[in-house]
Image: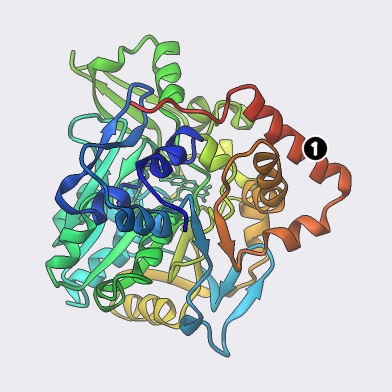
Amino acid sequence: MKQYNSEDIYKIVEQSQCIGCGICQGIVADEKIQMKKASNGYLQPIITGDIKQQEVIDILNVCPSRQLTTLPARLINESTQTDKIWGHYQSVKHCCAADEEQRYKGSSGGILTALAIYLLESNTVDFILHAKPSSSDPTFGEQQLSFNREDVLQSVGSRYGPTSMLENINALLDRGERFAIIGKPCDLSALRNLALIDKRVDELVKYWLTLVCGGFMPPEGTTQFLNEHLIKEDEVSKFRYRGHGFPGPTHVETSDGKTHDFSYYDFWGEDYKRWTLPHRCKICPDSIGEVADIVAADPWPGGGPNKDKIDERGNNVAIVRTVSGAELLDAAFKAGFIELEEETSIDVMNDYQPHQVARKYSSWARFQGLIDQGHHVPETHGLRTEELSNEMSEEFNDAQRKGMSDRVKQGKAKQPRD
Ligand SMILES: Cc1cc2nc3c(=O)[nH]c(=O)nc-3n(C[C@H](O)[C@H](O)[C@H](O)COP(=O)(O)OP(=O)(O)OC[C@H]3O[C@@H](n4cnc5c(N)ncnc54)[C@H](O)[C@@H]3O)c2cc1C
């Protein structure tokens, strides 16, 4: 029988597949793993104690870089439809927060914030597990537990920096309270994986909300952006990626009292030229939140905001995947927390999120490139990646496979361990 040890965990880090979610720390006893900002600027697990073989096996079973699935079968019913790109869904709806402040401050239209507030004020859950700007490193995110409207509003907006929100998940489950999670798709996948070995997850996690995720901003990308604008990183006291408008400016404050605002295209670059990604995000076969009740996204035709209408009032499009998600949206609408339009076609998502479509089609071939170089790839179930790859030309698949293989050879899929 194969023996597992801490090397199996470090392999995930060294092959640049750790997303920094923190669930490995969250499920082992006595803080034998600590999520730390490593010398390369990423949040990574540092092993500080003696990890037992069973703990390593549990970590490998929950890590979203080792296991990724679609919705649990019990959440798929006769009203579930399945789109080859977008996965299981009940409906797709345009929506936004009904409250103007939430809509304005929200990353898109504030739907996730409004739903979180509804869940708390209707006493449907006891708290929300999500993320707010880090108090120690303003470009990062950190876990936030929200118990009321004011707490939720501290977390409004997208955090594109590394964010480790599951590092104390065991302690959160020990509270025995009902909660909803709002996180990146990989955070939700980690928690769904945990549900398979810890029955408290399904008892206590009442709602699973996420965002369509293009990937987070690598620390070196943020550093480069700040350097280009002659802003000293160690003087940054506040960093808001977007929100306060749709999509709103990237807003930076520094310790000398100065403020700097950059438009969406200043930050991401024209044609998303500045959009760099961690290696794990480049190969993500599920950045569309396949395990969520509701997935929120930007409804931008063509995949980006209209430069002439940058200060529009915010809006979301939501993929409602489960009956429970549909009931939540309906209840929040009836209670006046959100605005909701009639159902629309799932095909709008292909127009709004072309980068996600491209990623889904290339994922399987990119995995083959990693396997060619002896790298590990996540085990996936129900994500349709091979099926989608089979629709593409041999030329496309070969180019994706070779491109990924070359990246590994060039050392671009490698991280040092601290
Ligand atoms: C890393 C990242 C990548 C994204 N990529 C895309 C994309 O490809 N396409 C697209 O349409 N939109 C993308 N978005 C933005 C996303 O569309 C909006 O956040 C979504 O539409 C929800 O908008 P909202 O106004 O409802 O959010 P809000 O009401 O502002 O609520 C956002 C919620 O998300 C939580 N949150 C924010 N960042 C994080 C984080 N890093 N980790 C965990 N929880 C977090 C907050 O705590 C808050 O509860 C991305 C956001 C992030 C953070």
* Foreground pick, 254 / 185: 185
* Foreground pick, 363 / 258: 363
Q: Amino acid at mark 1?
A: Ala
Indicate the position of residue 302 as horizontal and vertical percent values: 66, 47
**Quadrant in the picture for the C terminus:** top left
Residue at image coords 39%, 66%: 192
Q: SS at mark 1? A: helix
Badge 1 residue CB within 8 Å of ligand 1: no
Residue at image coords 46%, 38%: 11
Q: Is 20 situated above or below 185?
A: above
In the image as oriented, which residue stretches furthest toward the front? 1
Which image quadrant for residue 409? top right
Label 1 sits on residue: 399
**Mark 1 crowdedness (10 Å alpha carbons): few <14, some 14-19, many ≥20:** some
In the image as oriented, which residue stretches furthest toward the bottom? 78
* Foreground pick, 328 / 414: 414
Indicate the position of residue 19 as horizontal and vertical percent values: 42, 43
In the image as oriented, which residue stretches furthest toward the top? 230
Q: Is 376 situated above or below 258?
A: below
Horizontal placement of 272 versus 98: left or right? right
Residue at image coords 25%, 16%: 234
Way the structure is coloured: rainbow
* Foreground pick, 153 / 199: 199
Residue at image coords 51%, 81%: 73
Indicate the position of residue 237 as horizontal and vertical percent values: 21, 24
In the image as oriented, which residue stretches furthest toward the right? 394
Horizontal placement of 84 versus 182: left or right? right
Please state the total of marks drawn on the protein image.
1
Indicate the position of residue 63 as horizontal and vertical percent values: 41, 53
Horizontal placement of 102 versus 326: left or right? left
